[in-house]
Image (tube, helix red, strand yellow):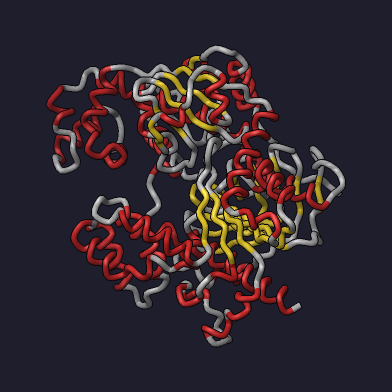
Amino acid sequence: MERQVPVRSSDEIDLYLRTIYSLLRSNNEVSIRTLEEVHAGTNSSLHIHARSSSKPDISALTYSLMRLPKEVINAKKVVLGQAASSFDDFGYGNVEKWQHVSAPARRRRCFWDGEETLACFIASRSDIDDVMPVLTALQMEWNKLHFLLQSAPQDLIDNAIPTQVKSFSELSTHLNIEIDELARLHSIWDDDFTDVLYKIKGSPLDYKVRLLSGSLNDYRKATVIWWDNIQNKVPEIVNRPIYFVSSNTHSLTNLLSGYALTKRDIILDYIAHHEPRLMNEWLEIQGQDKATNVENFFYYALRKLTETDQYANYIEEQQSHETSLGIHRVSSDHSFDVEANIIQLNALDPRFFDPRLAPKHEGYEKSWEFLKDSDALILNIDYQLGASAYNLLTKIAENVEKILGIYIMGKAASLNAIRGDVIIPNVVYDEHSKNSYLFSNAFKVTDVASYLNFGTVLDSQKAVTVLGTYLQNATIMDVVYREGYTDIEMEAGPYLSAIYELFRPARHPLNEIVNLYELPIDLGFLHYVSDTPFSKGQNLGAGSLSYFGMDSTYAVSLAILQRIMLLERRRLRE
């Protein structure tokens, strides 16, 4: 068979990775400043202005800020470890007693000592491939702004708010950035915007990073801690058949519990008085010729509602409602942050189901009677990052009775689609193993398209599982695109390596074309587009996904649930 695989990397990115790991082998703290030149030399597609000393790259800066806790701007040291015991062994004490902090766009357990140290739990080498470039990009762009702010008059900084149009525009000109880029920074720092500007002006960043251990064995131990926590809290998981889903941990739960839909009036009243942007979106939805997928709006708005002090008690009420329906949320303890939801199919109440789940060819109540006889569970874990996908699925498979289906929902950068589209791959090239995996995808265009209001579904696509978001450049993407690979994501390859080992008598191979057709298990991959690298500088740092950005997420989630329900009905009949 002729090999059709893309070039894995470039010399510049290989050098970057070698430099990172050679530095982190040190038992001492290492300086991020050492990485700045080699980072700029990669010509990363997410950091296109890295080499410019006078042009801040706000997309790269905001991308990094969204993936780190806000306390990072006050930190001097970042410590990475696999489990709580690792930090204790290296003299940091019980970091879990520090302040728990989190990033807006990356689930990673981090703790802040209140002075200068940020401790973060990592699940695999892929977390290092993510954290180190993110920290480096943040430091480089912060220090550019530090230099430019030295000559900024005090009154220009003091009056730099979007409502003061003239001064806000003058500051954006002074910083050599667009006014909408400055507005993006303002949306991140909000009320702290002026204080942060003075902090940037006052001192440059000079991060020190330390990796505690970092052996494969340490990652395996952390994975055991993660699984033991789930098994202790939901012990029946080891002797019940499961459908495994890797996605976010709110979409499936929202669709099956319907809690947000019971609060429609309260949500609409709240946004009418406190969320003008959301209210405008609601009016826009109502103004469509045919209002569709309105349920997504309430799922999105509920999160806004429960973030307020007035309605914070709804969080506990929601969890109680979910538990009564056999939906158990399990947060991580003492290791990396990968939340899990375990859903008992026979405890669900179809009266609360999202109406889009109702089969059109049968009566609503009658169609779900089979669930009462089900012994199956859905194990839904949060999105994975690279190699941790392999570790977690391998550990799950070792401990559960039987896996009935494996369904992966992931975010992707696309070279031929736009944000909000959905990609269905049947070929995956994995930069970790250098394997090309060929498989039958359980999903078809029609499974997703009926739930998708704003995007397009592309099937028969070829995906590349990359090592890290910053570890791509135009040269690599050009080669990838020429080979017909248009879907760039971060977990499919490691998952497929683990799946290979579920049904083959040997460890997954390296640098081969691997045939995974005719597996005795249902297998589906669906990716929704969140980045378009060929749009210069336009990544998730260039804006946040609103209600409209959830359209593809819920379309994919509905397709996965419909697939599970179809197979479970069929299994019980047989």
Q: Can residue 365 be seen in this view?
A: yes
Kindly indicate the quadrant of the structure image that contains residue 342.
bottom right
Q: Which residue is drawn at 64% across and 57% down?
A: 236
User: Which quarter of the image is occupied by the C terminus?
Assistant: bottom right
The residue under the point 48% across, 61% down is 323
What x and y, as percent, mark residue 374?
A: 65, 71
Above or below, 285 against 367 in this view is: above
Image position of 55 with respect to 434: above or below: above
Please state the horizontal and vertical placement of residue 465, each as a whole percent of the image.
64, 43
Q: Position of residue 398 (x, y in %)?
A: 74, 48
Task: Identify which residue, 26 or 430, lies in the foreground.
Answer: 26
Name above or below for residue 351 compared with residue 541.
Answer: below
Decide: is 400 above or below 268.
above
Q: In this view, does 436 lie to the left or right of 52?
A: right
> Going by the image, does 179 lie left or right of 4?
left
Q: Nearer the viewer, residue 448 or 508?
A: 508
Toward which corner of the image does residue 72 lie, by quadrant? Answer: top left
Residue at the spot 51% in from the left edge and 36% down from the top edge: 45
Residue 51 percent coordinates (x, y): 45, 23
**Is residue 36 something that shows in the picture?**
no
Q: Is 59 on the left-hand or right-hand side of 147?
A: right
Q: Is residue 140 left or right of residue 383?
A: left
The count of marks equals: 0
